[in-house]
Image (spheres, helix red, strand yellow):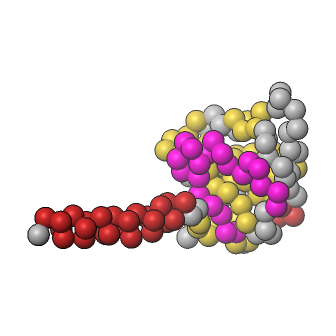
Amino acid sequence: MLKRTSLLLTLLIFTWLPAVAVRAALPVTQQVTLAGHRFTVEIANTDAMRERGLMFRTHMAANHGMLFVYSDAQPRYFWMKNTLIPLDIIFFDAHQRLINVSADTPPCKTEQCPTYTSAAPAQYVLELNAGMAKKLGLKPGERFTIR
């Protein structure tokens, strides 16, 4: 009886564990609307996800991006080290209002990379393909929504 229980438990673990691992590896996506335009964004809400960001990506589909979510509003500092595509870095406050945009931020190919800073405490940072902020005509105070 003990052998059978042990065998069942082992089978359960080895069939269930891979499903959990695959699910954990998939990015969480949400729909963000900004200036009447909808984007599919990956949510970066852990230190590890925020640290990695969009590094090493060679392409990002149109109308896609990454939303960095923090638990509080603080000055935020971003850099483009190991980021291979140019981005617009858009900073938002705790009420999801646009603070400032670092537009057309170029990839950094050196060891010393410049930082791009929020002009006020930010709780959300949205990275989109370079040129999107200009295309949308974004202005301070605009809000985004998440669905």
Can residue 90 be seen in this snapshot? no
Q: Nearer the viewer, residue 11 or 20?
A: 11
34 to the left or right of 12: right
In this view, the residue farthest toward the left is 1
**Vertical order, 91 against 61 (above or below):** above
- Horizontally, residue 102 falls left or right of residue 124, namely right
Pinpoint residue 142: horizontal percent, then vertical percent: 69, 58
- Measured as percent of width and height from the top left, residue 123 is found at 58, 45
Which residue occupies the foreground of this view, 32 or 2? 2
> Whole-percent x and y of residue 132?
83, 61
Q: Residue at x 70, y 69 (%)?
A: 39
For the point 67% across and 69% down, the residue is: 40
Q: Quadrant of residue 147?
A: bottom right
Q: Which residue is pictured at 87% across the width and 32% down the height?
A: 110
Number of numbered markers:
0
Q: Position of residue 44 (x, y in %)?
A: 59, 52
Q: Is residue 26 left or right of residue 125?
A: left
Quadrant of residue 76 within the rendered picture: top right
Q: Residue 41: within the magenta?
A: yes
Q: Is residue 65 magenta?
A: no
- Residue 74 location, quadrant: top right
Q: Is residue 147 above or below residue 99?
A: below
Task: Decide if residue 27 is in sight here.
Answer: yes
Q: Residue at x 25, y 68 (%)?
A: 7
Instruction: Report the span colored magenta.
Output: 39-59
Q: Quadrant of the N terminus?
A: bottom left
Q: Nearer the viewer, residue 121 or 42?
A: 42
